[in-house]
Image (spheres, helix red, strand yellow):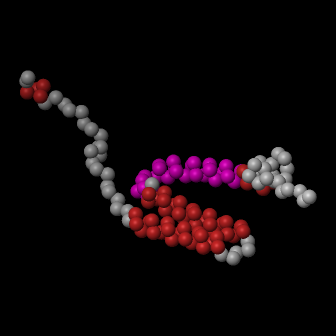
Amino acid sequence: MSVESSNARVPEEPHGVTEPLPHHHVNYLAIFSILVVLTIITVGVALLDIHNETVKVLLALFIASVKGICVAMFFMHLKFEGKLIYLIFIVPLLLCVLIVTALIPDVLMTSPTSSSASMHLFNPPPMSPR
């Protein structure tokens, strides 16, 4: 084997391939504590004597959204990702909200006493008095 053949050019690897990713310290116990406190607050909101059911539901949904954001950011590690992952995360989320919003009129306008009601399976029609 000649000296020239031993000095053959070794292909260069792309920059940054072998560099370790930075380690991010997350205090999982603190996040868990926040989620437990928010769950207790959600139960408290349900037990409050708020006569407007819409306000109760909106408060519970707001608290659930905060909990969901905490889970996504810390347990799914979205906080430490690049910007592209947010696009991948937000587009399906918006589609989900769009589908749920599009179904609201169908659920509200369908009478449970109608034989073709979509909610008929879950809410049987009231029994007629004898």
Let me know if residue 83 is in the magenta part: yes
Residue 59 in view, yes or no? yes
Determine the residue positioned at 28% across, 50% down: 20
In the displayed orientation, state which residue is furthest to the front.
Answer: 130
Image point 75% across, 49% down: which residue?
121
Is residue 117 or residue 100 the one in the foreground?
117
Q: Position of residue 80 (x, y in %)?
A: 40, 56
Residue positioned most to the left: 2
Q: Does residue 118 lie above or below 69 as drawn?
A: above
Task: Name the image quarter holding residue 29.
Answer: bottom left
Q: If the image is split into quadrants, where does the C terminus sit? A: bottom right
Q: Choose between 30 and 97: the one closer to the eye.
A: 30
Q: Residue furthest bottom?
A: 49
**Which residue: 45% across, 69% down?**
33
Query: Magenta stretch: dominant SS?
Result: helix
Residue 109: percent from the left, percent from the top? Answer: 81, 54
**Which residue is most to the right?**
130
x and y percentages locating residue 68 in the rendered image: 53, 60
Q: On the rendered image, what quadrant is the N terminus found in?
A: top left
Which segment did they paint magenta?
A: 77-102
Say above or below: 107 vs 9: below
Identify which residue, 13 or 24, lies in the foreground: 24
Q: Is 78 left, or right, of 112 in this rendering? A: left
Q: Is residue 81 left or right of 69 when viewed as pictured?
A: left
Give the side of residue 22 with respect to residue 40, left or right: left
Which quarter of the figure has residue 64?
A: bottom right
Q: Report the residue at 42% width, 55% height from top.
A: 77
The total of numbered circles placed on residues is: 0
Residue 92 painted magenta: yes
